[in-house]
Image (cartoon, rainbow, N blue to C red):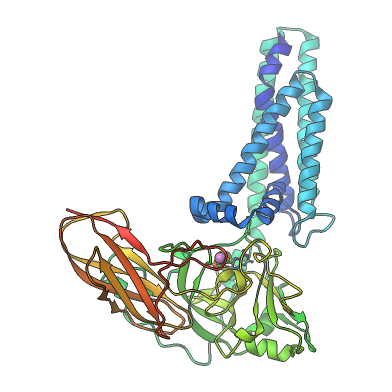
């Protein structure tokens, strides 16, 4: 009776043991930087090895939630394994169940040893997870045996006992989860960020003009608020960097390697830059693009002080979590590339690279915009490749001229009458000189353009259109500041950015 009962309880008990192990691991991982959560490490290894096509797919299907989807998938697989382990264990095959836990622990250990900056301590949480799961399984087993031996009303008693045990594990798990969250928050860069006082630029940029988006519902704002700014990176957990211990190194093929504390860096002259950044994975008409007023330190000055050797032809930024992005040294042609510390009047948000990142006007993010920056290396293209290059993306990646219709939305129904068609167009650093709109088969019409605050930023555009009933398609195309028309040839984002005119279909009734 007790045995049959226990077999049925195998699944929930297996899950309880494994979940308790994972929570114990998270608790240990939150005690100090450098201890890796096993699920995060497994996710990191998967992200490291996904081909460009899968990354594309994940971004398209899950958008910026791609990493939550990854973590949830890993947890689901682990939970399924936990059910199998629980059932195996409680049907008497103890060695096989322990063996499975040990194999899982070994995989997690290996995964955490491969994390950027891993030490021999990094797998500690994985080992704690494995040990916790095994101890809990053994404890359950002992209780089961005891109730069986005592023989008094076996099944009922063992079930009550086991539910009590489950409740205990539940409470312990919740307590550990709460404590680990508390510890993480206390150590958090979030608090330090609130205390960072941004230095003042020698000369402020003029205040932004009145935003046309105020009068055109649906049009993107001239400056994208930080909370709405797109986020793309490989970090499952945002790096938690303390400005007290943070250093920026500049080294590699240089005669004067440099190292700065956050204070030393921000004591230098800072300047403001209005710049639109874009992700190479952005589809035609997509939202992986945003405009901000950045505050930072001139990158060309920093590099000049380090004195690159004649052999150096690439500037590679590295983040605390092992990401890297490289671009030609020759790109620093006087343009306002910076080590950014501020975004739209605030210290960089954690999601966008606190305490410092690189911004290079005119280059896609994956070759330039390293967040959580810790090192800048002068190197050679024939010696080092940035993170995404061996994964199938181009080594050189200037931002292509693109335009997007924000309103009306693709597939929407609107009423006949006067309607605004509006959106944004960008071509940093060339600027936008014309935007044209075509409705159905009508000729292209020149759109009105919003203020050009800089050649590095996007420009809003709009036309008033007298909509009549039908199902028209609407297309947009931009001409950059050099007079070059945006390419009409539809291409995929990989290897160096999508091309084509954004075209939508709507219904007018
Ligand atoms: N450390 C780090 N920096 C990174 C990335 C990353 O994965 N890790 N992704 C880059 C890519 S692909 C883009 S498009 C931009 C996005 O910047 P955002 O998230 O601030 O919009 O960051 C870049 N910097
Ligand atoms: Mo990107």
| Closest to the observer, 173 or 286 | 286
The quarter in which the N terminus is drawn is top right
Q: Is residue 102 left or right of residue 72?
A: right
Residue 115 place in picture, x, y as percent: 75, 57
Residue 214 place in picture, x, y as percent: 29, 71
Residue 461 place in picture, x, y as percent: 31, 74
The quarter of the picture where residue 507 lies is: bottom left
Residue 226 seen in this snapshot: no
| Closest to the observer, 104 or 401 | 401
The quarter of the picture where residue 166 lies is: top right
Up/down of 196 relative to 388, above or below: below
**In the image, ligand 1 is in what quadrant?**
bottom right
Residue 333 place in picture, x, y as percent: 59, 89
Residue drawn 61% across the image and 72% down it: 367
Residue 277 seen in this snapshot: yes
The image shows a total of numbered marks equal to 0
Residue drawn 19% across the image and 68% down it: 465
| Closest to the observer, 219 or 237 | 219
């Amino acid at each position: 009776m007790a045995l049959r009962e226990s077999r049925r309880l195998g699944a929930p008990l297996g899950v309880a043991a494994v979940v308790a192990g994972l929570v114990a691991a998270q608790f240990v991982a939150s005690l100090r930087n450098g201890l890796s959560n096993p699920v995060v490490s497994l996710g990191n290894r998967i992200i490291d090895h996904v081909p460009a096509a899968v990354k594309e797919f994940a971004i398209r299907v899950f958008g910026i939630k791609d990493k939550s989807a990854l973590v949830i998938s890993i947890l689901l697989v682990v939970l399924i394994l936990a059910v199998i382990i629980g059932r195996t264990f409680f049907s008497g095959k103890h060695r096989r169940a322990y063996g499975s836990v040990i194999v899982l622990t070994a995989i997690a250990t290996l995964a955490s040893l491969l994390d950027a900056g891993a030490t021999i301590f990094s797998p500690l949480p994985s080992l704690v997870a494995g040990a916790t799961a095994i101890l809990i399984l053994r404890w359950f087993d002992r209780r089961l045996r005891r109730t069986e031996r005592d023989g008094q009303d076996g099944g009922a008693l063992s079930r009550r006992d086991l539910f009590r045990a489950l409740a205990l594990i539940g409470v312990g798990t919740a307590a550990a989860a709460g404590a680990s969250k508390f510890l993480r928050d206390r150590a958090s860069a979030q608090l330090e960020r609130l205390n960072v006082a941004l230095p003042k630029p020698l000369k402020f940029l003029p205040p932004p003009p009145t935003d046309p988006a105020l009068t055109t519902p649906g049009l993107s704002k001239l400056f994208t608020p930080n909370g709405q700014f797109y986020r793309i990176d490989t970090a499952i957990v945002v790096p938690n960097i303390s400005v007290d211990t943070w250093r920026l190194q500049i080294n590699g093929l240089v005669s004067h390697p440099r190292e700065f504390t956050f204070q030393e860096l921000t004591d230098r002259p800072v300047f403001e830059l209005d710049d639109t950044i874009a992700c190479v994975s952005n589809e035609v008409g997509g939202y992986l693009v945003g405009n901000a007023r950045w505050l930072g330190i001139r990158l060309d000055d920093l590099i000049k002080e380090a004195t690159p050797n004649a052999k150096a032809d690439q500037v590679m930024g590295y983040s605390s979590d092992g990401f890297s992005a490289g671009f030609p040294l020759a790109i620093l042609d006087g343009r306002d590339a910076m080590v950014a510390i501020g975004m739209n009047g605030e210290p960089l948000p954690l999601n966008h690279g606190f305490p410092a990142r690189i911004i290079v006007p005119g280059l896609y993010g994956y070759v330039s915009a390293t967040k959580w920056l810790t090192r800048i290396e002068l190197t050679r293209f024939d010696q080092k490749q940035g993170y995404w290059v061996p994964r199938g993306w181009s080594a050189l990646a200037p931002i292509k001229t693109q335009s997007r219709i924000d309103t009306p939305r693709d597939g929407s129904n609107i009423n006949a009458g006067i309607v605004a068609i509006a959106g944004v167009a960008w071509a940093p650093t060339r600027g936008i000189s014309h935007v044209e709109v075509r409705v159905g088969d009508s000729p292209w019409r020149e759109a009105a353009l919003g203020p050009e605050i800089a050649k590095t930023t996007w420009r809003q555009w709009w036309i008033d259109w007298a909509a009549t009933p039908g199902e028209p398609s609407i297309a947009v195309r931009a001409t950059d500041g050099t007079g070059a028309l945006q390419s009409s040839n539809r291409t995929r984002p990989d290897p160096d950015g999508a091309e084509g005119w954004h075209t939508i279909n709507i219904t007018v009734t």
